[in-house]
Image (spheres, grey):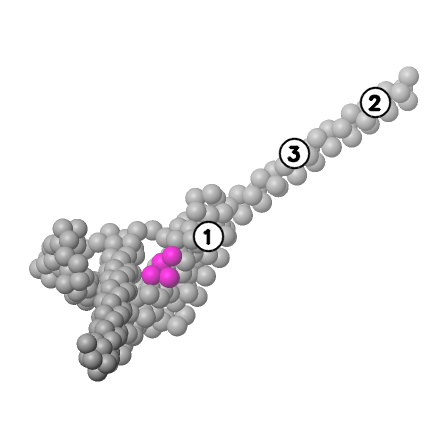
Amino acid sequence: MSTTTITIAIVAIIFLCIGAIYISQARERARVERIRKTNVLTERHNRMQQLIHDLPPQYLNNELRIMIAERSVETLNELIILNKTERLQGYLTADHDYLKNLRENNPKFPAVPVKTEAKAKEVRGYLEVLQRFIQSQHKAKRLNAGSAKKYLDHISLSICQSKADLFCGRAEAANANGKPRVAIHNYHSAIDAFKEFAKHPQAAKAIALYKAKIKALDEVADQHNKKFREQEEAKKQEGNKEWDSFLDDEDQWQKKNSYD
């Protein structure tokens, strides 16, 4: 075998090794990218589901629900392209059914009370996620400026509503414990929570309701104070009677001693 042939063979082997390494690295990069994309899509789908099912219903309208459900379906379709499983197919069927119900029936969802600071913080966290999602959809030109503004205004109002709901929960608890003045203070805080949206019809309606409750509680507090004053006055008068009786007994005793 000539030197030239040996050289060509060695060069060919080197190129084959380089090619094999390149192909192996490309496959590894593709595998890592596939995993990364799957994780991103899975996380996005989980966030969509949390917004639909974990966020208390009073903070979303059906228009927003439909948009979130549509994005959830799109995300699942992308996931199924990467890795088709029965579990993902089940999620997709459930999302399609949910979306169909929203579009055809426009259902009403009962409000879920927000009674603790931890729950209120969780709600605000979900709403902030939704805020960023709407902003990203607008940036990606999936939402026009008008729709984005409408949704963002609704979310900002919902954040205020979540704060007001927490104060209302505290007010109701205070009233149940016979502390009307504490309840009044919390209703005033609920009104302050809507300060930025005071002229919004939904906020104005809530503020009017809180003011009516404050007025009713003022009357209860006044009656409570009046009753307390009456009780204190009765105790004072009873004490005076006991003291007068003691003094009368003392006078009679002194008179008896003087007579003796």
Secondary structure type for disc 1: helix
From this viewpoint, which residue is outermost toward the front? 1
Whether residue 208 sits left or right of residue 13 in the image: it is right
Q: Which mark is residue 238?
A: 3
User: Residue at position x 39%, y 50% from top?
Assistant: 115
User: Residue at position x 37%, y 61% from top?
Assistant: 125
Question: Which comes before the other along the chain, label 2 or label 3?
Answer: 3
Which amino acid type is marked by label 3?
Glu
Secondary structure type for disc 2: helix
Q: Do the residues labelled 1 and 2 touch (CB within 8 Å)?
A: no
Label 3 environment density (alpha carbons within 10 Å; few <14, some 14–19, many ≥20): few
Q: For the image shown, how many numbered marks are present on the structure?
A: 3
Q: Name the residue under label 1.
A: 183
Looking at this view, is 188 or 226 the one in front? Answer: 188
> Residue 3, percent across and down?
23, 81
Q: Which of marks 1 and 3 is in front?
A: 1
> Label 1 vs label 2: CA separation?
55 Å
> Residue 131, percent across and down?
32, 69
Quadrant location of the C terminus? top right
Tell me where the magenta segment starts and ends, as one range: 122-126
Q: Name the residue under label 2.
A: 253
Whether residue 99 sits left or right of residue 181 in the image: it is left
Which amino acid type is marked by label 1?
Ala
Q: Which of marks 2 and 3 is in front?
A: 3
Which amino acid type is marked by label 2?
Trp
> Label 1 vs label 3: CA separation?
33 Å
Label 2 environment density (alpha carbons within 10 Å; few <14, some 14–19, many ≥20): few
> Label 2 vs label 3: CA separation?
23 Å
> Residue 138, percent across and down?
25, 77
Question: Which comes before the other along the chain, label 1 or label 3?
Answer: 1
Q: Is residue 57 visible?
A: no
